[in-house]
Image (spheres, rainbow, N blue to C red):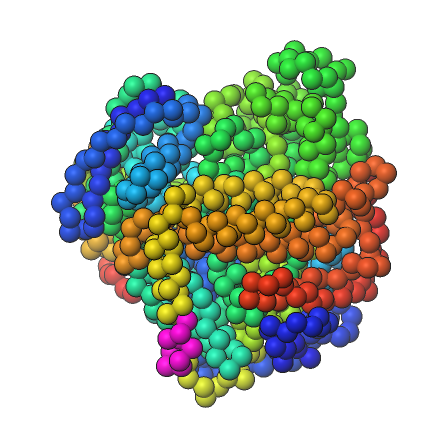
Amino acid sequence: MNLTLKVWRQENAQDAGRFEEHQLSDVSADSSFLEMLDQLNERLESAGESPVVFDHDCREGICGACGLMINGQAHGHRARTTACQLHMREFSDGETITIEPWRSGSFPVMRDLMVDRSAFDRIIQSGGFISVNTGSAPEANLIPVPKEKSDAAFDAATCIGCGACVAQCPNGAAQLFTAAKVGHLGAVPQGDPEADQRVVNMVEQMQEEGFGSCTNHRECEAACPKGISISWIAGLNRGYLKAKLRGVDRRS
Amino acid sequence: MMSSSLDPSSQTSVVLDPAVPTGPIEKQWDEHRRQLRMVAPNNRRKFDVIVVGSGLAGASCAATLGEQGYNVKCFCFQDSPRRAHSIAAQGGINAAKNYQNDGDSAYRLFYDTIKGGDFRSRESNVWRLAEASVNIIDQAVAQGVPFAREYGGMLENRSFGGVQVSRTFYARGQTGQQLLLGAYQALARQIAAGTVEMFTRTEMLDVVVVNGRASGIVVRDLRTGVVSSHAGHAVVLATGGYSNVYYLSTNAMGCNVTAAWRAHRKGAYFANPCYTQIHPTCIPQSAEHQSKLTLMSESLRNDGRIWVPKDSRGRHPVDVPEAERDYYLERKYPSFGNLVPRDVASRNAKTVVDREQGVGPLKNGVYLDFADAIGRLGQDAIEARYGNLFEMYERITGENPYQSPMRIYPAPHYTMGGLWVDYNLMSNLEGLFVLGEANFSDHGANRLGASALMQGLADGYFIAPYTVANYLAGRLGETASTSDQAFVETERAVSDRSERYLSCSGSRTVDSFHRELGRIVWDECGMSRTAAGLEQAIGRIRSLHQEYHSDVKVVGSADAINQSLERAGRVEDFFELAELMCRDALDRNESAGGHFREEHQTEEGEAQRDDENYSYVSAWAWNNGEPATLHKEPLEFDVVRPSQRSYK
């Protein structure tokens, strides 16, 4: 395949950035999107030019490291697929492909296509856990968990923390990410004792990080490579409201 | 009792003592814990512990030490600890819970692991692992890990290769992800509590040794390029395995041996480097451009049947009549069938492909067929069990595995070898602890499925927290500081190395060298090895390494984000490791588990051990680039008598 790539290049967070155009030929339809970028980088490096910087690691769609806006869509046009699992056979010969980093004030661009998603880590640190020290756990089968609840918990827990939801949202909201963790831990009985505190802490940390507000565009759900449903956001809002009505304030 | 008095660069071979407690095996760990020294709660904050790596072993260890009140600094090269490669483990985690009432016990799990490892692991460690397995499940469930459950609400199990019980706990095909997120969240809680300071996008590039003890590390901030030192009373490495020495493997792109290798260069012994696991169920390579191979969980072998056509006519699989198919695993191993251990399954796949019975456009695969299972259970049931794996297969290959069989072929996946550790998981370099895949300890010459998660978490949650405390107890009153000249010198050496790559101005990219190196190691030190091939490989690796020094091209600078520079150092370490793997494979004049020397096989083509001469752990000492010195830890089997493995 022959492709025209319009790739975002940016030296650092201060740099204004710009698109750079490259022609790439002999791309195999069987290669993944990131392998296509490898091919571009190998060519740039051989010519002594600086390669395009992007985050990636497992290349199996599970680590959440890769995140590219491909033709304006987070992870590209194929539903429920991360950029690393998107293959070039999904594109046509001669196509022009635009590649940008996640665009969100809370995910500052570090270089080229690499952004800083540490805000997600801080949201988890604010309460995205069950407080159980190593060694203090009871026998695993002591508390039966209905299969439906366990399956629901998994559906939310499958979030890979890639940030596509934020990147695709016109408001740059992180509700889907936050709701998925609140939903996962709230769906199992082990998460009950801290449920109110957790939702208050996490929602308020999310706001502090500067993410936008959710206005139900549902772009996040469509962009999520793991297909996490926005109904979790409804649960998040309900949980937050109830906790606030019960007078729960943020506590660290 | 320990080998700490050894001069790490000693040229003479010594016998290593792992300091295993005496007494009956089932009481050893309890007895040992009674004797380990402790640190009082009010003294713990006086100790700084460095944990490198944030996968299952690193995150669980850092979180647990933080909970106990130590000052922990945890480092990872990824942008978040949640991205460590443990996240990609699919199938499950073993535990001797015997929830299925099918006769499981700590002894069974121990026995299966020892046998699966082809009698090349340390009995005492494996017993302790089997005991700890049950606590891991309790801990993970309490953290909210959504394991698969029965309708009655109890935990569900499935079966994995090499065993005859159902002891594997799982969360669809994403068990590693869910366990890692559990550990990550425990770690996040400690970061919030201030007991753990987390350093992301920070790569450890050397360990600093002061007075013979690991006293800190030198790191490079991957965002700014700044090289700095961190001191600790103890250093814990949980930095994973080295499958990426093969270039193409199922490991994440960033997985590397650098932390372990640099520690090796500072005196830590590297044990059994030739024990590598080539996983039988991966998607075959499709072309030259490929950057990695993708695993299809071993759990698929529960329902998929492996076969190749008896001829090489290249017909579409559904057109091959039943009588013309060779279900070679079921034929050769009737009692384990498609669930033989990984090394056996891989070797048999290689045999049929070498005989030109391979399938697919490049004739480099075998079929994994679900037609019978779909007929028996319905497509919905298969989708519920393996839906995400089938989807992944379709994305990568463009073929629908519900309609025609998957094509699979073995690929490098896990490395049993790693830094040598004693019973306390401490290397011969005092104060340096090594956990998870980075150490060599529990899987012998072949790891059974669903055991990597178990070992990483056992080490991190339940073993290292005791043994590290024991070590720290003896350091009370000492301050951890970077003031020693050794820190300055190590920092300088790290910076000099970066400069060397950047100033080389050669003509070939790091990746092109890595690909070529990987090819050599795969051909000569992969699924089967010969003395002649290994000797030749050592020569080729050395000359390619020389060429690397003079002809590598790394653009950019050291004081900014530079992913090529990061890879340059990692690939250089792979060169040195690759040579050691070949030397180790050459020294081990027998076959055992994943190490298959063609000269040593039974009449039926199975691995033939030589217990009389090779029942030892090979622990290699770095010799400043000269051939490494071999030290040996004799293996003793008091509980299980080594025998020819049989899965027939």
Q: Position of residue A161 (x, y in %)?
A: 35, 45
Q: Position of residue B362 (x, y in %)?
A: 58, 23
Left or right position of A122 against B274: left
The quadrant in which the N terminus of chain B is found is bottom right
Q: In the rendered image of this protein, does residue A218 appear above or below residue B101? A: above
Pick whichever, A193 or B601, lies toward us.
B601
Magenta span includes A180: no
Residue A222 falls in image quadrant: top left
Image: magenta residue range: B482-490
Q: Position of residue B85 (x, y in %)?
A: 47, 49
Q: Main secondary structure of the magenta part?
A: helix
Identity of the residue drawn at 59% across and 39% down:
B411
Residue A30 falls in image quadrant: top left
The quadrant in which the C terminus of chain B is found is top right
Identity of the residue drawn at 15% across and 48% down:
A15
Q: In the rendered image of this protein, does residue B356 appear above or below residue B484? A: above
Q: In the rendered image of this protein, does residue B10 appear above or below residue B441? A: below
Count numbered badges in the picture: 0
Residue B346 in view here: yes
Residue B198 in view here: no
Magenta span includes B487: yes
Left or right position of A201 against B448: left
Left or right position of A213 against B556: left
Question: Farthest bottom residue?
Answer: B477
Identity of the residue drawn at 38% across and 43% down:
B507
Q: Position of residue B306 (x, y in %)?
A: 68, 28
Identity of the residue drawn at 40% across and 68% down:
B493
